Each structure stands twice: as C-alpha cells, then as structure tokens.
Image (cartoon, coloured by chain):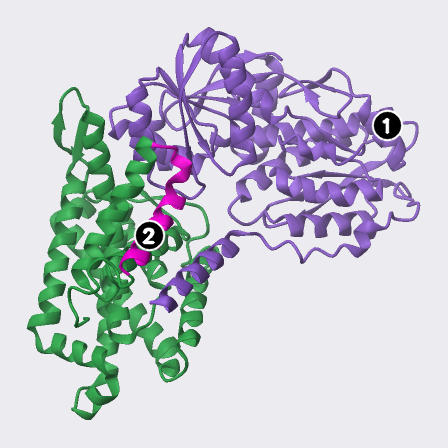
Chain colours: A green, B purple
Amino acid sequence: MGEFVQHLINGLAAGTIYALVALGYTMVYGVLKLINFAHGDVMMVGTFFAYAVARGLGRPANTSFLGVTVIFLVAMAGCALLGLVIERFAYRPLREKPRLTALITAIGISFTLSYGFQLDFGPLPGAAPRAFPEIIPPREWLILGDRAVVIWNWQVISLGIALLLMVALQSLVYRTRFGRAMRAVSFDHRTAALMGIPVDRVIALTFMLGSALAAGAGILFALKDTVVQPLMGLYVGLKAFVAAVIGGIGNVPGAVVGGLLLGLVEEFVVGYSASSWRDAVAFSFLILVLLVRPSGLFGRATAEKV
Amino acid sequence: MRTLLAATAAAAVLLGAGCEKKSATAPAGPAAAPAPAPAPSAGNTVLIGEVFSLTGDKATFGISSRNGIEMAVKEANAAGGVKGKKIETRVYDDQGKPEEAANATTRLVNQDQVVLVLGEVASSNSIAMAHVAQPAQVPMITPTSTNPKVTEVGDYIFRVCFIDPFQGFVMAKFARDNLKLNKVAVLRDLRSDYSTGLTDVFTRKFTEMGGKIVAVETYNQGDSDFRGQLTAIKRAGPDGIYIPGYYNEVGVIAKQARELGLTVPLMGGDGWDSEKLFELGGSAVEGHYLSNHYSADDPSPRVRKFVADYKAAYGSVPDALATIAYDAAGVAIAAMRRAPDLSRKSIRDAIAQTKDYPGVGGSVTLDERRNAVKPAVVLKVGKGKFDYVTTINP
C-alpha cells in the first residue's frame, strides 16, 4: 500500500511538469495550428537562465522569497523575449506557407537550441550536466508510516503552481479582451484581421506567454530532478506534446489532465512491470487514446478551441 | 487529426535520428590501404602519436591522459631515450567524436609516420582508431578503453587496463566478501554496452557466491527521474544496489534514493570516476563504493612517488586516466627498448611479450588476447574525493 501511494506521488510530480509544458504547446497550437516543437528547448533555455541568475545571486540570496521571485521573473522574461524572436523571424514569414514548412522549421529551431547550447564558448554552457541550485531547499512535507511514503515540499508547490496557472490561463482565454482576440484569431485569423484585431500582436503575445510558461515549467523540472543539461528539452518536450494530444490539443484543462495522466501511466508501468517498457507504453497509450477519441480526451467537450 | 499522428511519428523519428552520431564523415580511403614501408626511425628522434579528446564534454579524460604520457616520455628522454634517439610526441584532438578519432589516426599514420599510436579513453573512439591502425599495421595501445571489442579488432591493438566484465567480478566479490550483502538490486543503463557487460558478470558471480538478485530495473541515458525504479527497488528490500552507470546519472540517482528513504550502499564501476559526481550528487553519494583502475591513496611507494611527481608537474592529484596513460606510455617505451629495431612490426612483437611490467596502476601482463591482466581497486566515495578501500586480484 505504501509503495502504491509513493508511486502515485512520483507520478503526479512527473505529470505536473508534463502538464505545464503541455500548456504552452496547446496555446500555440490553439492560435496558430502550429505544433511548436521548439517548445521543450525554450524550456531548457529558460532553465539555464534561471541557473545563471541563481548562481549569480549566490547561496543565501537565491533561497529567499525575493531571490526566488527574481529568478522566476528573469527566466520567464528571457524566454518571453526568445519566444518573440523565434515567432518574428522563424514562424511569421512562413505563416501563409504550407503548414509542413513551419513544422520542419520548428524542428530545426529545436535542434539549433539543444545542440547549440552544447557548444562551449561565450555564455553557452557546454554539454556536461550541471547541478541546479536548490533555490527551494527540499523539506519533507509529509511522512507516512516508517518512511513508506514521503512527500516533499517542492512536489506540493509544483502541483499548486500547475493548477493555479491552468485556472489563470483558462480565465485569460475566456474572461479577458485579449482572450477573446485569441479565440477570434484561432477561429479564422483573416476574418479576425478584418474585424480590427491586431493578429500579429495577438500571435506574438501568445508565443511570449507560452514561452514564459515554459521557463516556469523548466525551473520546477530542475527543482524536481536537480540537474540541467542542454538535451533535457527534447524528451520532456516530446512527452508534453503527447500529453497535450491526449488531453485534446488546443484545450487548456485537457493539457493539464493529459500531463498528469501520462506521468501516472509512466510511473505505474515502471513500478509494476518492467521499467524498460515505460516509453513504449507511453506512446501506445497515445495511439490508443487517438483511436478511441481522435480529438483527445477533452477535444469534443468544448467545440470552441482556445 | 491525422496530420497530428503523422507529426508525432515524424517527431519520434527525428528525435531518434538526433541522438545518433553521424559516422559517414570519416574518409575511408587512406585508412584502407596499408602505408608503404615507412622509415619512421630516421634521424635522431622517434615519433609517437596520441589521439585524445582535449575539448568537448569528455575533455578532462583526454587532458589527464595526455599529461600522464608527457610525463612518461619526459622521464624516458631524461634516461637517454630509446636506442640513442629522443622520443617525440604528436597529439591530435578528436573532440570526443569517433569519426574525428579515425581522421586523426589516419593523419598520424600516413602523414606523420609515427611508429605507434596511443589513444582514447572512450571505447567507441578507440574502436574507430583501431580500424585505422590495424590495416595500416601500426601498433596501438589504448590506456583506458575497457570494452572487450577494442582489442578484438586485430593483433596490432593492445590495452593496459582490465576489461569491463572484470569490474562486475570485482564488485560481486567485494559485495559478498567484504560488505556481506545477501540481497542486491540492480539498476542499469538499458542501452549501454558497458552497463550491460558489468551487470551480466556481477549477476553471475554474485549468485554463484550464494547471493540473491532481488530486482532488476533499467533506465535510459539522459533520464533524470528515477523515482519509479527506486520505489520498486525499495519494495524488494535489498541490502545493496548495483548501479553500473555513468556519473551524470548516478549522482542524480543517489540523491533520489536518499529522498525516498533508501539508505543501503550503492555500488558501481569506473564510470562513476569524475569530479562531476560530487557536484551532481552532493552529500548523497558519500559512503558508496566503486571499482576502479587505481587509487591515489594507495600506500605503495611506487604510487606515492608517481603522485608526488605528477603534482609537482601539473599541480593536481593524478586521476586513474592519467595514471593508466602513464603506464601505457611506459609499456610502449619498454617495448621499444626491447625490440631489435624500431620498425612497427618489431615494436608490435615486443609489446605483445610484455610481462610483469611494473606499472603505477598495478603490474601489467598482456595475455594472448592483448588485454592486461591486473588487479582492480575498490574505492569509497568520501567528501569530494574517493578513498582507497582494498585491492582485488583477478
């Protein structure tokens, strides 16, 4: 029983990260119908921003509330800027081109970031993994039995942040003027432009928002696994994409549910069958969901996408 | 939605492709044809080639190895060189890539006309080099590549370290005899030859000695969340965990094991040997055990003198890579002194007869498969350093 609960907690913690990264995929897909494969790598870049700031601040300062806030804000702002640049120079020129062109460009950007960051000159970090500073010092939040189940403070904080962001994003999309503009662009961007909506600005802002979210997810990821390295975005990005599709891509609660579900499925495969089956089962799960519900778990419940 | 499926598939394929090393760039032409009979020993010097990773993520491996060789060569020259000639070295950087290692070897063999090649730490790079050196009939000694396949390339390829399976044997013996463990769980890297090789021999030897393997879990290189595997291992209740992986995963595994309340000793091999282990694992890696080629704490006078000389020359304690590279150069120089002349063929034959060479990392005897038969040490991870525990003989 104890280890079942521990698996549940491990799975939720892993799923939280997938969920946060999946939110970014889903937003960009919602407005542009573009699968932004560089999203995981933007997350990686954000984590390195946070790493640099945390190291710059030094030991006591980077664990204070103010320090942690600064680390999050700098990383998120840096990534928002990166997202803006990527959108402006890589995706906007291709917006009227066939969708496959933009998709391949996204994969190109993904590789440029993840392999570029392995270079070892100037501010680039090099390929070796690094220990991420413990900006939220790990503390046991709850211990059950004879340490049969241990829940850590960062696991609770991460899950809280993920749910909070989901609610915030949902209300942004459905309760603000900007959200209404996003939905209009998503529906038909040419018509939206005719109605006086600044389409370019809405798309750029969506990218910035998604990239800032990725930076936040990256920091939580680094807090969970305590290590950062340039290739970390590739797999997390792919898993999060699977999570977004499972939940119904373009759908905000779907991304969160898909992420948590994928994290749990992976954890239980590792825990109760052979650990080498993990990835095979994760991707089979995707195929299964798509066969039964082609538009994902939440795809049909809301006819109108973000 | 069909495009989505296609996109997923495309991404999966691309991701896979991204992880593969391109290997088509190495020119096969010059390597395939044996060089015409060289006159490498003309003049007053004799040239030795070296290929190591001096840049890239494995740069520390290459720099240590080069330092060790430099030291051996300097000492040999001070003692009169070989056959009245001074030894010179030429080093090329392969950036840690097999194709570059092959290119560099081709250049050493054909352009620079070296009499022998010393090189590489990573087994995949050494294998690439061996495929150039063997057809050109240039003797090659790898200091620290432990994969059995390296010397299987041909009769010109030698090594002065033990091979992977031996480390599994050493740790099984240590776990059973010294730590008195009965139930051990294994956590191994699914796709690494190194990890699989160590696991197989460890499992066989440990069971043979009356122990029991209670759980086998796997991970993939690049993973950073091992909590699922560790929770499953915890349920099996082992008194030790064997993790024959590399330091970048092991550091994180040690942290997460402690986080989940696993306090049993962890055991591994020379893949743990890096400063990075302390950075990534923090205090969680302390008190665990690994097998390795050599320990700087070894009290024997030969080791003490080497450590002191190395410190004087380079300002740091020599790691296992520097030490074994020093021995590799020593074996090569001793063979050149014994050989009737300095042709590549004579040097090869002399290396093959190496017996009881008094190396710093243990006495070296080469067997008929051109591998060294020598003891291994078991180290305990301490505060920022590895402490010597014991030596285990083959």
Horizontal side of A223 relative to B356 (left or right) equals: left
Visible residue check, residue B70: yes
Q: Where is residue B139? Give x, y as percent.
A: 80, 36
Determine the chain carrying the residue at label 1. Answer: B
Q: Which residue is drawn at 24% across and 71% down?
A: A30
Q: Which residue lies furthest to the left in this view?
A: A175
**Which residue does the numbered mark 2 point to in the structure image?**
A288
- Amino acid found under the numbered disc labelled 2: Leu
Q: In this view, does B252 lie above or below B101?
A: above
- Camera-near label (1 vs 2) is 2
| Crowdedness near tag 1: few (<14), some (14–19) or many (≥20) residues, C-alpha within 10 Å | some
Q: Residue at x 20, y 47 (%)?
A: A62
**Which residue does the numbered mark 1 point to in the structure image?**
B349
Visible residue check, residue B112: no
Q: Residue at x 25, y 60 (%)?
A: A296
Closer to the camera, B112 or A275? A275
The reply to whether discs 1 and 2 touch (Cβ–Cβ < 8 Å) is no
- Amino acid found under the numbered disc labelled 1: Asp
What span is in magenta?
A273-293
